[in-house]
Amino acid sequence: MQLDLLPILKCLHCGHDGLQQQENSRIVNKETLLDGAGVCPRCHTRYPVKDGIINFLSRRTPNITFGQLPNQFTFTAWGYERLWRKRALSLLGGREWLPEEELATLIEMLNADGFKREGYEIATHNGVAFILDEGSSTGFYARAVACAIRDGKLNMGGAPLHVVAIDNSWQMLQEARKYIEQEGLSDAISLVRADVEDMPFINKAFAGITNGAALNEFKHTEPALSETRRTLDKFGNAVFMVQMKARGKTGRLLDTLITLTSGIKFFDYAQLEQHYDRAGFRCLEQVSSGLVTISRLRKR
């Protein structure tokens, strides 16, 4: 993890804003905390860092559904992108929906009008703007955002941009770390192991937030959306890709069986809008096809 992440981290034990690096932590390139810990200066709670991943779940079990349990295994993490993720939207969307199109939509929505409006000032912390990828798994969205920043396709007011990927699976984050290193993005992305329903970030930490179908898997939908709202800047865009309820009697029956056995949820458009509204979001635009919808949200 990058050292400039420490000021926006929050102690989950006492609620103090900002962590400090533990003495004798292993620092590489003068800015990356590779091994050691982040420490709360108030209550001295220690959050270990190993392989550059800070772990807020080292002392407790992640708050997961049965359907999320496979994500805790190494083979699932290895096969997530190789066997599923890059084909997912084409299979669920009812048309050829290539990753390049999905990711272009993601970047366009994340960078939409909020950064051009008169009077808008991007949320920065010590001169750095942060973008969060919730339920990041292997960092599919996080890496796309980091590449867009590197290639000049995402420019939020000219401030340096730092991507943060959060997931509750250590194995998924380890796989993400490998992809990040292979793609030369180690200095652009920090990895955080924590629950999205109780995120270790200060209020209004992020200039933008992305979520790639993780909303379907969260154990409690509204607390996760509430945490998204709490950590998003007033003018920031949140981009959610969600799997919708199937159509037809057979599809609805299958959805019900999946929900009952795994805890994974599917939404119709009215339910999804209701969840967003209750959390204090307004939906500004949507792209939908088949069982997939991508929405751009902003705080009301």
Image (tube, rainbow, N blue to C red):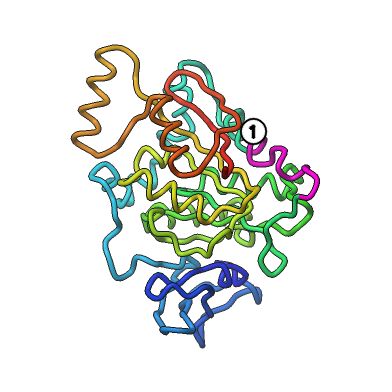
Compared to 107, does 59 lie above or below? below
User: How many discs mark residues in the rendered view?
Assistant: 1
Q: Amino acid at mark 1?
A: Ala
Q: Secondary structure at mark 1?
A: helix
Q: Residues within 10 Å of mark 1 (few under 14, many from 20)?
A: some
Residue at the top extreme, as displayed:
248
Q: Is residue 96 above or below residue 75?
A: above
- Lateral position of residue 200 relative to residue 220, left or right: right
Q: Say which residue appears at 56% left-offset and 67% top-offset.
A: 8
Point 25% across, 12% down: residue: 249
Q: Is residue 154 left or right of residue 40?
A: right
Seen from the viewer's position, the closer of residues 130 and 184 is: 130
Q: Nearer the viewer, residue 224 or 180?
A: 224
Q: Please provide percent x and percent y for residue 72.
A: 31, 52
**Residue holding disc 1:** 104
Residue 175 in percent (x, y) is at 44, 53
Q: Position of residue 273 (x, y in %)?
A: 45, 31
Q: Quadrant of residue 290?
A: top left
Give x and y (percent) for residue 25: 51, 82
Determine the residue positioned at 65% across, 76% down: 30
Q: Would you say residue 116 sits in the magenta stretch? A: yes
Judge by depth and name the residue closer to the eye, 121 or 172: 121
The region drawn magenta spans 107-119
User: Is-magenta flag for residue 83?
Assistant: no
Q: Quadrant of the N terminus?
A: bottom right
Q: Quadrant of the C terminus?
A: top right
Which residue is at 28% across, 50% downward?
64
